Image: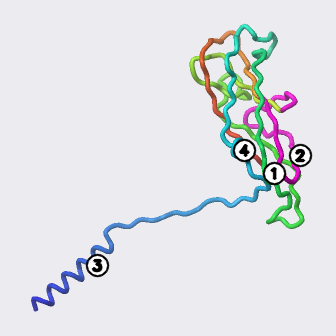
């Protein structure tokens, strides 16, 4: 009888040890078809405006700091234009949407944080056309292989609120293919 009690208590301890907590695991994601990859140097970029003098502000209804324009690129690599999931569909263009924290006075501009005040960042096409924050660009034609999408950024100043100092901002971009 003593051996039977010992055997039962060992079995009962093993059963308890097997269930000493439980939970759930949720798995998911999103599978997308993208005709192009993004070059690693385009994923996380820094655009350095350097030192820009507030005395270089142009006059007008939307004053810009002259000489503040900086160019940047998004490089698309290994573009395969034939769709894998849509028979007989060929990708021909890409669009870009830039998002971030909008300027408090002009939601089309990217806001900045730091010591500088009364400035915001305007995103531009390579031709200098403004790209309002949160809007989709015109189509950029793409070809098989590698493609480079070119953009610019410049500082807009609000003279009545301007204060010199360092600043930073963050924009994210989203690509869509047509």
Distance between the alpha carbons at the discs numbered 2 and 4: 16 Å
From the image, tell me which residue sits under label 2: 141
Region of the chain picked out in magenta, as a range? 126-152
> Could you tell me which secondary element the residue under label 2 belongs to?
strand
**Residue sitting at x 75%, y 27%:** 153
Residues marked 1 and 3 touching at CB (< 8 Å): no
- Residue 3 in the image: state x and y as whole percent: 13, 89
Residue 130 counted in the magenta span: yes
Mark with earlier residue (2, 3): 3
Distance between the alpha carbons at the discs numbered 2 and 3: 64 Å
- Residue 48 in the image: state x and y as whole percent: 68, 26
Q: Is residue 131 above or below residue 69?
A: below
Q: Is residue 49 above or below residue 75?
A: above
**Residue sitting at x 57%, y 21%:** 114
> Could you tell me which secondary element the residue under label 3 belongs to?
helix
Distance between the alpha carbons at the discs numbered 4 and 1: 10 Å
User: In the image, 40: left or right of 148?
Assistant: left
Distance between the alpha carbons at the discs numbered 1 and 3: 55 Å
Q: Residues within 10 Å of mark 1 (few under 14, many from 20)?
A: some
165 vs 85, nearest the viewer:
165
35 vs 40, nearest the viewer:
40
Distance between the alpha carbons at the discs numbered 4 and 3: 52 Å
From the image, tell me which residue sits under label 1: 177
Label at residue 174: 4
Distance between the alpha carbons at the discs numbered 2 and 1: 10 Å
Mark with earlier residue (2, 1): 2
Report the mark closest to the observer, 2 or 1. 2
From the image, tell me which residue sits under label 3: 15
Residues marked 2 and 4 touching at CB (< 8 Å): no
> Could you tell me which secondary element the residue under label 1 belongs to?
strand
């Amino acid at each position: 009888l003593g051996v039977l009690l010992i055997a039962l208590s060992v079995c009962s301890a093993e059963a308890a040890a097997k269930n000493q907590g439980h939970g759930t695991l949720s798995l998911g994601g999103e599978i997308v078809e993208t005709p192009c990859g993004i070059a690693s140097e385009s994923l996380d970029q820094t655009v350095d405006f350097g030192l820009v003098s507030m005395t270089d502000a142009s006059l007008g209804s939307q004053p810009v700091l002259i000489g503040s324009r900086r160019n940047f690129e998004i490089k698309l690599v290994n573009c395969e234009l034939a769709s894998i999931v849509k028979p007989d569909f060929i990708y021909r263009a890409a669009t870009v949407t830039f998002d971030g924290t909008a300027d408090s006075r002009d939601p089309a501009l990217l806001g900045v944080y730091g010591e500088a005040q009364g400035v915001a960042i305007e995103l531009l096409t390579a031709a200098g056309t403004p790209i309002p924050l949160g809007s989709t660009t015109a189509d950029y034609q793409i070809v098989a292989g590698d493609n480079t999408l070119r953009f610019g950024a410049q500082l807009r100043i609000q003279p009545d609120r301007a204060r010199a100092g360092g600043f930073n901002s963050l924009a994210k971009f989203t690509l869509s293919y047509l």
